[in-house]
Every structure is written in structure tokens, then in C-alpha cells.
Amino acid sequence: MDGLALRLARLIQETGPLTLAQYMALCLHDPADGYYATRPGLGAAGDFITAPEVSQMFGEMIGVWAVSVWAAMGRPAPVRLVELGPGSGALIGDLLRAAKAEPAFLAAMDLWLVELSAPLRKAQAARLAGVPVSFAESLDQVPRDAPVIVIGNEFLDCFGVRQFVRRDGAWLEHRVGLDASGGLCLGLAPPPSGFSAPADAPEGAVLEVSSAQEALGEAIGLRIGEAGGAALLIDYGRDRFGFGDTFQALAGHRKVDPLARPGHADLTVHVDFPSVAAAARRGGARTTPITEQGRFLQRMGIAARARTLCDSAVRSGRPELAEVLARQLHRLVDPTGMGQLFKVLCVHALAADPPGFSDAEEAA
Ligand code: SAH
């Protein structure tokens, strides 16, 4: 066992088995040994790949979205552009390039990146060379005196869940404890007092509850209700209530045992979008329908953008690039790739839903 595993074992001996949410937070963010704090592995050479790492077109479409939302907000200056968990900085770099089409937006923008990971902050600053940017550890640290446009791709999936399972007609909680030889193992404990679950759950059903995801949804709703603006949240997750175990660990692009090497793998859960949206409405904002990523990107014009990039690749004598772009487009929008599993939710304070969220856009 290395550093973090040993410290977790000691913590469990002292305080009892951990909830999955506690375990995830420690494995991801422990300052000495946490995954994001020490060895975040985004991209093809790392542990997992995200949409902005697949293609520049993803961040560009979000740039088109941000500029049109800013117009719908009445072109406020300043406007705080906030990215939650910017990873390598690819998304924000591509967004800003697309936003060059609207220099007034860039002039009005005050850019904030919410990031805990020191190595990733460094990568983001390098990617944005020359662009003035401020860093924060949470949305709460971003000043409240101007409207916001918030972007978060694969951010909420890092916010852990408590996991409950129905056994012999009763609910029990999955917790990380210690086995007979002192290693980490998953066990069952009674649920907390006040726990409630749907009465009609079948035997074996797994229920995931994320107070951290909901708290973030509420904070975003509160901020937008007060200051105005919009937030775009993109993640893999569900668009309606459902049971299921979605806790997973990825290392080297493979699913691994989440308890095997704490701090060495990316740990995620599916985002419970209906609960996040309800929390944002409680906070005082409106929410759009929860929409599939493929649909959202198509409505934002990704096919036309792909054609423009392909044409220019062919014109400059690089037809192989056109094939790469076609593959990227397919991966982002097709149901067999990221198009259906990934969902998009917008929290906003606008009179009408922003672009990307209405069936009418398909017909256009
Ligand atoms: N949005 C990027 C990266 C996704 S990985 C992309 O799509 O490629 C998750 C990102 O969120 C990382 O940058 C990670 O360091 C950051 N992160 C995770 N939990 C966080 C938290 N609680 N507070 C701030 N940043 C967090």
C-alpha cells in the first residue's frame, strides 16, 4: 500500500467506513496524493479523454453559444466568463478563438477559471498565454457584482455520491471499509437517519444521491438568479430518475477497480441532471430541457463547422485531415460515441431558452 491507501486505512480505523462521496473527494483532491493534485491524466496519452480533447470543434461550438447568450443577455460589460474545471485548457482556448468573431464580447469578458489542481492550473495558464485570467477554488470565490456565463464540461461527474442498495427489502449504504487483512473493501452499513427512497424499488436496486452535485446546482441557480446570466453544464449522466451503479475508475483508458490504487485513477459517477436542475430552480434560476450532447452540437452548427474545416484541409493539400475531422465529428455527435450518453443542461435567467435547447432549431 502506498501513501494515500495507508492514510485512508488509518482514517477508516479511527472514524469508521467512508461514504463513496468521502472516498472520491479524498482520492481526487488530497493535496499530497490525490489524482488531480498529483497526476491528472487527460488526453490520449493519459487516463481518459474528454470532448474538448477529441476535437477543437467542441470548444468552438461552446464559443458560438457563449457569444449568442451574451447577446441575449443584452451585451453586458463586464461579463464574467467562468469555466469550472478547465482540465488542459483546450475548451477555453477553442472557445476564445471562436469568440474572436465578436470582439466586443472579448472586450467585455472577465475570465475566471475554477480549478483546484496545481498542475492543471499551470497547463491552463500556459494554454492561455497572454490572456488575462483569474483563478478561483470555487464559484463562490468569483466576485458577485456582474452577470456570469458559466461553462462546465465533465466537472459535475467528479462530485461524489452516496450509494444505497436494496437488500432483502431494506436499504443499506455502500461504504469503503477494511477487510480482514487491512485492505480497502466495499461493505454495507445502515443508511443515515432520515434516508428516504422510492417505495417501489426492486430488490438489488442501487440508488445514488449526490448532495455535492445538488449543492453546486443550487449555488449556480442562486448566482444566476441574483446576478443574471447562464450556465452550460455538460456531462455523462441521466436525464430522468433511474437506479444504477455508475461509480467507476479509469486509468490508461481502462476501467479499473476503484479501490485498488487510490489516487492513481480518475473516479467518476454519472451526473443526476434532474436533481441538479431542480436544485438550480430552488436557487432562483430557470432551466432548459436536459438535452443530448449530439443534438445540442448539431443545433449549434457543428456540421457546418466541420465542412468548413474539411474544405480548408482539402484546399491546403491535407485530405487526411478531412478524414480525421469526420471521425471527430462522429465521435462527438453520434449515439454510438458521446452524442447520447452525454447530456447538456442550461441554467439561466433569460426570457427564453438560449440556443441549442429547442426542437424548432432542428426544423430550421
Ligand atoms: N473540463 C475539462 C476537464 C475535465 S476533468 C475537459 O472537459 O477536458 C475535471 C476537471 O475538474 C479537472 O480540471 C479537475 O481538476 C477539476 N475539478 C474536479 N473537481 C473539482 C472541484 N471540486 N473544484 C475545482 N475543480 C475541480
Image (spheres, rainbow, N blue to C red):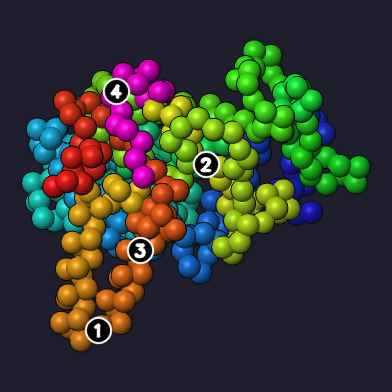
According to the image, label 2 marks what residue?
A: 270
Which residue is painted at 46% across and 64% down in the image? 43
Check disc 4 and report the residue beneath it. Answer: 285
Q: In whole angstroms, how far apart are the C-alphas of marks 4 and 2?
A: 23 Å
- Residue 167: x %, y % from top left: 76, 28
Instruction: Give the Cα separation between the discs numbered 1 and 2.
Output: 39 Å
At label 1, the amino acid type is Arg
Residues under numbered marks 4 and 2 in contact, where contact means CB atoms less than 8 Å apart:
no
Name of the residue lying farthest toward the right: 180
Which disc is residue 318 wearing? Answer: 1
Mark 1 near mark 3, Cβ–Cβ under 8 Å? no
Badges 4 and 1: C-beta atoms under 8 Å apart? no
> Which disc is residue 330 wearing?
3
- Residue span colored magenta: 278-292
The tag earlier along the polypeptide, 3 or 2, is 2
Callout 3 amino acid: His
Alpha-carbon distance for marks 3 and 2?
22 Å
- Asked whether disc 1 touches disc 2, contact meaning CB atoms under 8 Å apart, the reply is no
